[in-house]
Image (tube, rainbow, N blue to C red):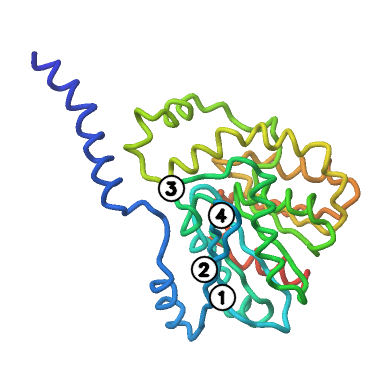
Amino acid sequence: MKALKKRNLFWIIPLLILLIINFSGCLQMRDSDRKIAKKLAKKHLIARFHNYTKGTQTIHYWDISNPDKPIVLFVHGSPGSSMALMGIATDTFITANFMPVLVDRPGFGYSNFGHAESSFARQSELLDAVLKSYPNQRKILVGHSLGGPIIVKMAMDFPDEIDAIVILAGSIDPALEPYEWHRKPMSSKFIRWMIPKAFTASNDEILTTKAELTKMLPDWEKIKIPIIVIQGTKDGFVPKENADFAKRMAKKAQVKLRMLPGQSHFFPFTKPEIVMEELMLLR
């Protein structure tokens, strides 16, 4: 009987913790416009917040105006939101030399929170509408983790609108996508209601990532703009061989690989100066 009670506690206690976290909202991985504005005010920066609706999707994004400089669209991974790459995007180097634009991808932040868009083509189309709101500036895309293949898809779909892409630890090779047994159970209606919405949205899009990357294989030859791939050699989430995949596939593009010995998946946050160095070359 005691062993049975202990076994029950083994499942009940983590379940209660998960439920408390879920309903408390502390894992939403987003900040309100008001909180972001307060943080930027400490840096003497002013953000402009935007929303646009297309069909059932509402996309939320914000920028720091610098109309004479190239646009840099920062695209976060999974889960995440526009605040994920805010540290780099609001660095004084970036705000002086570029116009940073940060977007909440579908299902995250304040873009239909909790309702993922599993189609990369649809995500590409929705984010392209953000770019179209800045018609007279050069455009550079920066994508981290799952944001990497999204910006690749945008470069395939809208080659005349984008000037360069920078892939940070991007999952782009379908053959390297891992099999994770827990993802399908997490998507079931019996379990997903207990999981924070940012993580259900993430799980939904990761479930189809391998298939979406496979669909993209014939279109790599459409990319003719410069591609910079930055990858840590100690990345525990995205195999470092993804970087070589870009070089093999984008045969009509100028591809630069920058491997970072000993760096993890999170080098954009721990070593942002590396990203800034590469962006300077694209200015």
Inter-mark Cα distance, 4 to 3: 11 Å
Q: Residue tagged by mark 4?
A: 105
Disc nearer the start of the sequence (2/4)? 2
* Viewer-closest of 282 and 153: 153
Q: Secondary structure at mark 3?
A: helix
Please give left or right for residue 107 compared with residue 158 in the image.
Answer: left
**Image x and y of residue 9, in percent:** 17, 27
Q: Decide: marks 1, 2 in contact (CB < 8 A)?
A: yes
**Image x and y of residue 191, in percent:** 35, 30
Q: Secondary structure at mark 4?
A: loop
Q: Decide: marks 4, 3 in contact (CB < 8 A)?
A: no
Inter-mark Cα distance, 1 to 2: 6 Å
Q: Secondary structure at mark 1?
A: loop
Q: Decide: marks 2, 4 in contact (CB < 8 A)?
A: no
Furthest residue in direction right, as rendered: 252
Disc nearer the start of the sequence (1/4)? 1
Q: Residue tagged by mark 1?
A: 91
Q: Which mark is residue 198?
A: 3
Q: Residue tagged by mark 2?
A: 87
Disc nearer the start of the sequence (3/1)? 1
| Residue type indicated by callout 4 | Arg
Q: How would you rate the neighbour count of disc 1 (Cα within 10 Å): few for under 14, some for 14-19, many for 20 or more? A: some
Indicate which label's residue lies in the foreground, 3 or 1: 3
Q: Secondary structure at mark 2?
A: helix
Furthest residue in direction left, as rendered: 1
Q: How would you rate the neighbour count of disc 2 (Cα within 10 Å): few for under 14, some for 14-19, many for 20 or more? A: few
